[in-house]
Image (cartoon, helix red, strand yellow):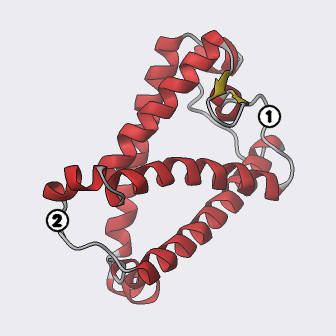
Amino acid sequence: MGAAVFPVVIFFVAVALWNRVNGSFLVPGILLNVNVWNGMVQEAPPEEWWMVFLENLLLWLSVYSVAYMVIYLEPSSSIFRPFKFNPQYPERSMVLREFFRSVRGVLICSLMEVVTGTLFKYKYLPSSLCLTWMCETAPRDLKISSLLFIFVLLYLWGDTHFYWTHRMLHTRWLYKRVHKEHHQSY
């Protein structure tokens, strides 16, 4: 799934950058104006935890729904079948179980985001890594080159963080009590 998610994320970032310059666009068929940039970059985070959860859930649904459709639905699934490590496709019950596990993960991460944002807002969690050109400029006024640099930096940080936390989850105690469920997935 990761191989399909990265291009989808790149697509959403490209659409957001296009929205930043050109404004919203009309989605054909449903007549809805969409501005991905305004959804991704906000001057202040939402105050209510359920708004954070809703935003994260909608972002997760949009990215992973596209990735799921590309990998598991015809005609595109036949293109990706040669690249799958496991040539079988999961049963519907497994897909539903994974869906609800993922929603639970989005909820947990959203709560972490609310706690971190609150601590940062009240200056209990200062950031010493804030570069002048990032901190003294409103997010909407950053240059595209700066945004791309930040995107690459965050991607590398996220990948490194994921690797080391995943290694930690494979210690005997954490694997048995927390991570084993992940390996029961398809």
Q: Amino acid at mark 2?
A: Phe
Spot occupied by residue 29 in the image (x, y as percentages of width and height): 64, 35
Task: Work out whether residue 143 or residue 77 is closer to the camera in this orientation and state it.
Answer: 77
Left or right, 58 with respect to 123, comes to left
The circle drawn on residue 173 is none
Name the quadrant of the C terminus: bottom left
Residue in the image at 44% along x and 32% along y: 11
Earlier residue among tags 2 and 1: 1
Q: Which residue is mark 2?
A: 85
Left or right, 150 with respect to 25, comes to left
Residue in the image at 64% along x and 36% along y: 127
Left or right, 149 with respect to 2, comes to right
Task: Work out whether residue 103 or residue 92 is closer to the camera in this orientation and state it.
Answer: 92
Q: Amino acid at mark 1?
A: Ala
Residue in the image at 80% along x and 57% along y: 49
112 to 15, vertically: above or below: below
What secondary structure is marked by label 2? loop
The circle drawn on residue 44 is 1
